[in-house]
């Protein structure tokens, strides 16, 4: 019995592997398609499909150039040049002239430039003098008030410990009053930033030349924002959109729309961002690729900030005169321009087109998913639709394998019943492995069973006659 069972298992496994291999090379599976006649669901399906069609193919594939391989790694270099003559009125018939060397500080920076628009200048030498009245602890009545003072960041020198008197013009401007301040050792006289600043005139009429060289290393493409036949011009979005020379008044108007804020920017300084954005379609001529310029203010507006407004810094020019070290200290206010360059380039790529097309086809199938969900879960006839879409099959018994090409009955015959009365029905019933249709297998099984039973009955009659039995077995 064990040998027969193991042989049957091996035979079943061999048939199963044969069925799998045979089905793999000869059978093709597809989804079941159910046609549902519903005006509402069909209209909803077509509406969603149209929206997805315009979005996927119109917007993503065509407008966003989904057929191109795009790269945003850009290498850029910027050179800035400012031209313009400013002046400072010192009297009715006296003025100081400022050129680029005077108001551009420092002369060169990386992707940035500073233009001085206003300054406070103090001529100093190394000596002793009184501290600035802007320092609260500098006021004193005696020398002891100037000693053992904690170090402060607003001190202008090393305190000597002496309290010195200094004259001050009274409010009626007719007599001088005196006040006492602590004495320092350092650069004298100290800077007094409360005095009226010196404003450089005609700054808005200056021009700035912005030269940009860029490269997309992925595509080995180099380009610049300067045309081949560049002539003297000033940027204008309508008449000269390709000119890289900008007037400062245009930049200020684009960065700040409020007139009062623009005047304060020239007085106290500001930080302005100038951005060049490249978007190059390398399927066309590279000469048709032009940058888009944009301007924005980076510092906080003056009506919102209460501490450290604008942009300023100090610098000094040193020299020596008659063994005395001297310097000209300037607190400079001005406009600091920071240049940023960004960009992307795209070129047709078949692999990118294939991947994006597959993704868009998947997005297009979202319409069927939505409609199926509504149809099978939210509609009134959801149960009926679900029965048509989903079909449940019970797996057939292992003995009903359709891959067998022959019928194989068990060797147990009716004599087993006579010899072993305790034999079960499973041991006696013939087992057939299916190779034909169920109806044909049923007919073959009945025919085989009938012939087997008749043969067994004949053998039983002969066996009873040999034993001397006269009553036939029914």
Image (cartoon, grey):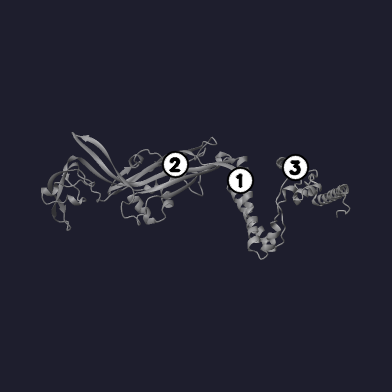
Q: Is residue 49 visible?
A: no
Tell me which numbered mark, 3 or 1, is placed earlier along the sequence: 3
Q: Residues within 10 Å of mark 2 (few under 14, many from 20)?
A: many
Q: Nearer the viewer, mark 1 or mark 2?
A: 1
Q: How many callouts does the rendering have? A: 3
Q: Position of residue 116 (x, y in %)?
A: 34, 45
Seen from the viewer's position, the closer of residues 450 and 472 is 472
Q: Residues within 10 Å of mark 3 (few under 14, many from 20)?
A: few
Residue 342 x/y as whole percent = 48, 43
Q: Mark 3 sits on what residue?
A: 26
In this orientation, which residue lies closer to the viewer: 338 or 374?
A: 374
Circle 2: element type: strand
Q: Are the residues flagged by discs 2 and 3 in contact, CB closer than 8 Å?
A: no
Please give the residue where the numbered disc 1 appears in the rendered image: 356
Please tell me in which quadrant of the rendered image residue 368 appears. bottom right
**Residue at position x 11%, y 48% in the image:** 144
Q: Secondary structure at mark 1?
A: helix
166 on left or right of 366: left
Residue bearing the label numbered 2? 210
Question: How far from the left and from the top, in percent, is residue 9?
Answer: 70, 42
Nearer-N-terminus badge (1/2) = 2
């Amino acid at each position: 019995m064990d040998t027969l069972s193991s042989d049957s298992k091996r035979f079943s496994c061999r048939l199963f592997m044969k069925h799998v291999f045979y089905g793999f090379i000869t059978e093709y599976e597809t989804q079941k398609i159910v046609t549902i006649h519903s005006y509402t669901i069909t209209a909803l399906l077509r509406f969603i499909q149209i929206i997805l069609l315009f979005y996927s193919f119109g917007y993503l594939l065509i407008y966003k150039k989904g057929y191109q391989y795009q790269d945003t790694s850009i290498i850029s270099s910027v050179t800035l040049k400012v031209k313009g003559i400013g002046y400072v009125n010192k009297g009715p018939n006296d003025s100081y002239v400022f050129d680029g060397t005077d108001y551009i500080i420092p002369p060169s920076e990386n992707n940035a430039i500073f233009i001085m628009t206003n300054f406070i200048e103090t001529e100093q030498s190394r000596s002793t003098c009184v501290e600035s009245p802007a320092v609260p602890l500098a006021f004193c009545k005696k020398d002891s008030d100037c000693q053992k003072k904690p170090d402060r960041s607003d001190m202008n020198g090393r305190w000597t410990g002496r309290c010195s008197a200094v004259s001050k013009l009274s409010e009626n401007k007719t007599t001088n009053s005196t006040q006492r301040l602590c004495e320092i050792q350092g650069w004298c006289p100290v800077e007094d930033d409360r005095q009226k600043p010196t404003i450089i005139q005609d700054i808005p009429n200056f021009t700035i030349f912005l030269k940009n060289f860029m490269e997309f290393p992925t595509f080995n493409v180099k380009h610049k924002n300067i045309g081949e036949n560049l002539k003297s011009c000033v940027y204008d979005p309508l008449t000269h959109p390709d000119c890289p020379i900008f007037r400062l008044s245009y930049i200020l108007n684009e960065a700040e729309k409020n007139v009062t804020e623009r005047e304060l920017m020239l007085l106290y300084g500001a930080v302005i961002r100038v951005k060049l954005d490249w978007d190059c379609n390398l399927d066309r001529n590279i000469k048709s690729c032009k940058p888009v310029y944009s301007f924005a203010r980076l510092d906080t507006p003056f009506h919102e900030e209460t501490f450290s407004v604008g942009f300023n810094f100090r610098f000094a020019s040193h020299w020596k005169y008659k063994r005395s070290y001297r310097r000209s200290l300037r607190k400079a206010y001005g406009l600091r321009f920071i240049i940023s360059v960004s960009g992307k380039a795209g070129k047709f790529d078949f692999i990118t087109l294939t991947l994006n097309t597959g993704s868009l086809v998947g997005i297009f199938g979202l319409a069927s998913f939505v409609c199926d969900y509504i149809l099978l879960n939210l509609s009134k006839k959801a149960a009926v639709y679900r029965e048509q879409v989903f079909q449940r099959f019970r797996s057939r018994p292992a003995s009903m394998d359709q891959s067998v090409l022959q019928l194989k009955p068990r060797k147990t015959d009716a004599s087993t019943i006579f010899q072993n009365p305790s034999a079960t029905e499973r041991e006696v019933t013939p087992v057939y492995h299916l190779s034909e249709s169920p109806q044909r297998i049923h007919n073959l099984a009945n025919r085989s069973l009938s012939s087997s039973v008749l043969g067994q009955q004949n053998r039983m009659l002969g066996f009873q006659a040999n034993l001397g039995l006269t009553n036939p077995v029914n």
